[in-house]
Image (spheres, grey):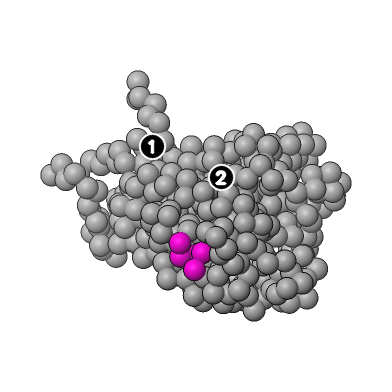
Amino acid sequence: MVKDYSIDTLVVHQPNDDKFNSSIAPLYQTTTFKQKSVSDLGQYDYTRSGNPTRSQLEFQLGKLIKSDYTYAVNSGMSCLDVITRLIKIGDEVIVGDDLYGGTHRLLTFLNNNKSIKLKHIDTTDTNLLLNSITSNTKFLFLESPTNPLIKVINLPKISKFIRKNFPQIKIIFDNTMMTPLLLSPLDYVDIQYESATKYLNGHHDIMAGVIATRNLQLSQDLFFIINATGCGLAPFDSWLLLRGLKTLSIRFAKQQSNTLIIANWLESIGFKVRYPGLKSHPQYELHKSFNKGFGAVLSFETQSIKKSEIIVENTKIFGVTVSFGCVNSLISMPCRMSHASIDEKTRKERNLPEDLIRLCVGIEDVNDLIDDLKSSLILSGIVQEIDGKLIKLNQSKL
Ligand SMILES: Cc1ncc(COP(=O)(O)O)c(C=O)c1O
Ligand SMILES: N[C@@H](CCSC[C@H](N)C(=O)O)C(=O)O
């Protein structure tokens, strides 16, 4: 019987069957594989169709994700591209109203081309979501917590209702924020995907994505598209991702504990902080009920776009950078950066605050991170230090 290791062990324990017993999985940096004969392709013939280093990665990821079929592709957006090719012309697709900007961009493009009929719903309002389903609805795309408003959806309830009443609907879940460490979405959904560019790799040196399912038919359809379009992850990137994965558990634990401390600190100064690990988060209990942790992304508001710009542009440790999940801490203004592909009118309709600052917390010393933020907040004038105490100025004084 194979021992059921904990996920902290599984990320590091990466057995391989190299004929020289190499302790690290070998890198098959090759495009083609020699065939025994013209009719015997062997296990691998061409790297677009399959490569042993990518297979090793997919095997490893499958254990973490608890999937039966797992595919590594060349970015998170490629995952979405592959999955949306399953949609048939005219199918109704329901998506959240707070989505990663690139997800919004691709789905809107397909909607504008009339390939799909898109409905945006506030997916935190479970009744609204479930009532908006019709017999034409074929796909539901969900994220939780959402990027960047950190809204949490009731995944167990939505999944139970749909599986019982609308089994024809395929639920697709973007698990980039939680990673397989904190959530196993396949217990609730048909396909999960995530941008491995973020936490899974953790070092901002590759782009990658993972698609996983437990459904054989879906897996065959997904593999067909990946091979046909040629978006499978390249061997060297697969090898680097295997390396990055080994420290996922330890990196993410530190990132989360740093984030919770920073979230509490910002809230104690008087900022409106969005982080599911804070008791003030409207879905704190819900989030805890089906996730094993809170992640390492938070956002907060300043009520002043100008002040937000000063804060973001003056930190020294936090880099002004899109993306998240890296060992280094990052700071950004989503409306100007990661979510700029959502037009201003739509951002307004969706209550996406233009002054919103997003922090993606890394593994540095948390006191250094707090000092860095403190200096920037003081420089912006939004906070004053009086007798060693930080005082946030109220909006009218800004
Ligand atoms: C939640 C989420 N999903 C998907 C993506 C797309 O991933 P990638 O940049 O690897 O294409 C991103 C960011 O880019 C994201 O934030
Ligand atoms: N210019 C890029 C922006 C990427 S945003 C990356 C990440 N998902 C984030 O939320 O920061 C684009 O147009 O896609």
In front: mark 1 or mark 2? 2
- Tell me which corner region of the image, top left, top right, bottom left or bottom right, holds residue 196: bottom left
Residue 332 vs residue 124: left or right?
A: left
Precedes in sequence: disc 1 or disc 2: 1
Task: Decide whether residue 169 is among the magenta residues.
Answer: no
Looking at the picture, how far across and down is residue 314, in whole percent? Answer: 49, 75
Give the spatial CA distance, label 1 vs label 2. 17 Å
Q: Is residue 212 visible?
A: yes
Q: Is mark 2 within 8 Å of ligand 1?
A: no
- Tell me which corner region of the image, top left, top right, bottom left or bottom right, holds residue 159: top right
Task: Decide whether residue 374 is among the magenta residues.
Answer: yes
Range of residues picked out in magenta: 371-375
Please identify the residue farthest to the front as the structure is shown.
387
Q: Quadrant of the C terminus?
A: bottom right
Label 2 sits on a secondary structure element that is: loop
Looking at the picture, how far across and down is residue 171, in whole percent? Answer: 67, 47
Residue where numbered disc 2 is placed? 294
Residue where numbered disc 1 is placed? 8
Neighbour class for label 2 at 10 Å: few (<14), some, many (≥20)? many
Residue 353 vs residue 101: left or right?
A: right
Kindly identify the residue that appears in the image at 60 percent across and 44 percent down.
Answer: 277
Kindly identify the residue that appears in the image at 78 percent across and 76 percent down.
Answer: 345
Q: Is residue 343 above or below residue 157?
A: below
Kindly identify the residue that appears in the image at 15 percent across and 41 percent down.
Answer: 21
Kindly identify the residue that appears in the image at 43 percent across and 53 percent down.
Answer: 366
Q: Is mark 1 within 8 Å of ligand 1?
A: no
- Tell me which corner region of the image, top left, top right, bottom left or bottom right, holds residue 291: top right
- Chief secondary structure of the magenta portion: helix
